[in-house]
Image (cartoon, grey):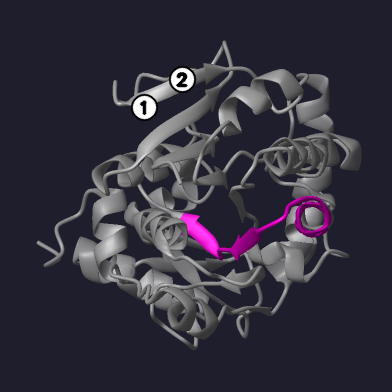
Amino acid sequence: MADVVALTGATGFVGGVVAARLVSAGWRVRALVRPASDDRRLTARVERVPGSLEDPASLGRLVRGVRAVVHCAGLVRGVSRADFERVNVDGVVRLARAAAREVPAPRVILVSSAAARQPALSDYAASKLAGERALAAGAAEWTVLRPPALYGPGDRELLPLLQWMRRGVGLVLGPPSARFSLLYVEDLADALVRLVQTDGLASAAFELHDGRPAGYAWDDVLAAVGRLRGRAVRRVAVPGSALRLLAHANVLLAGARGRAPMLTPGKVRELQHPDWVCDNAALSAATGWTPRIGLDAGLSRTLGLPADGR
């Protein structure tokens, strides 16, 4: 089997880190790159395949003769369920079909989301579960990874909230009893490399976290940022009712500007869900992967704060 790995989403937050990790592990990387994408983060050692998830011909060129396909591309902001399904479901279907035509067929590894556990909460969550099911139906060999909330340098979703914490204002967007797992993006990339390297895996879905089995409460994150900045972060609880009103206003404002909103009623339901704690056990047993970067170290790298709080 060739030592080439096909990669989608390589110009994004997660995919760029995955590409670098695969290259450093000795793999040749072939990346699907949309013509309008900024690919300057990718090294010259990454082969570019111009195209998109909507173009079956480019997907065929992407997966030809590869060892595995790592699918990081996905839509996190959309106006409607159809927007999410076009990328997070239909894109998976086309990619799985392209891979299934190869002999031997490569394993397709899908980066999904823990949100797929609760598809009724949002169009995004529903699309991630539907994408997983489409992969299982269409690929000969497949693996699904369901990461929790991801963070790290280059993140655009969680980073603004963390930056407010760095300034001393801790906006708490979920109930006090809520618990959730977190994962630094480099640990996700390491897990994907392990999956590529591990032969004989049965097709399955895996969760992962940063080494804290019980997950975190919001106050744990505020305390960690406080340790790093050397001063406590002021806790500002945002009521769910206020979040819902803000979400509806944000949808209207984004629509007027022709943009896809991030904060939507569905996203608020995700934020208000009480349990996003994940379990590493199955993935570690199957691949030997263990997370390396805990919360304090990850936040230090993400926010540019010294680890000793000085």
Q: Residue at x 66, y 77 (%)?
A: 175
Q: Secondary structure at mark 2?
A: strand
Circle 2: residue type: Arg
Please indicate whether residue 38 sits to the left or right of residue 103 in the image: left
Q: Position of residue 169 (x, y in %)?
A: 42, 58
Q: Secondary structure at mark 1?
A: strand
Picture layout, residue 148 above or below residue 279: above
Q: Nearer the viewer, residue 119 or 112?
A: 112
Is residue 232 at least partly visible in the picture? no
Q: Position of residue 238 (x, y in %)?
A: 64, 64
The CA distance from mark 2 to mark 1 is 6 Å
Is residue 179 at least partly visible in the picture? yes
Picture layout, residue 122 above or below residue 46: below
Circle 1: residue type: Val
Q: Position of residue 143 (x, y in %)?
A: 62, 62
Q: Residue at x 37, y 50 (%)?
A: 152
Picture layout, residue 302 above or below residue 214: above
Please indicate whether residue 305 sits to the left or right of residue 111 in the image: left
- Residue indicated by mark 1: 46
Q: Residue at x 50, y 76 (%)?
A: 283
Q: Residues within 10 Å of mark 2 (few under 14, many from 20)?
A: some
Inspect the magenta stretch and tell me whether residue 273 lies in it. no
User: Quarter of the image holding residue 251?
Assistant: top right
- Residue indicated by mark 2: 48
Q: Which mark is residue 89?
A: none
Inspect the magenta stretch and tell me whether residue 130 lies in it. yes
Q: Residue at x 50, y 85 (%)?
A: 281
Magenta span covers which residues? 129-150
Q: Nearer the viewer, residue 118 or 200?
A: 200
Q: Is the residue under label 1 in contact with that under label 2 (CB below 8 Å)?
A: yes
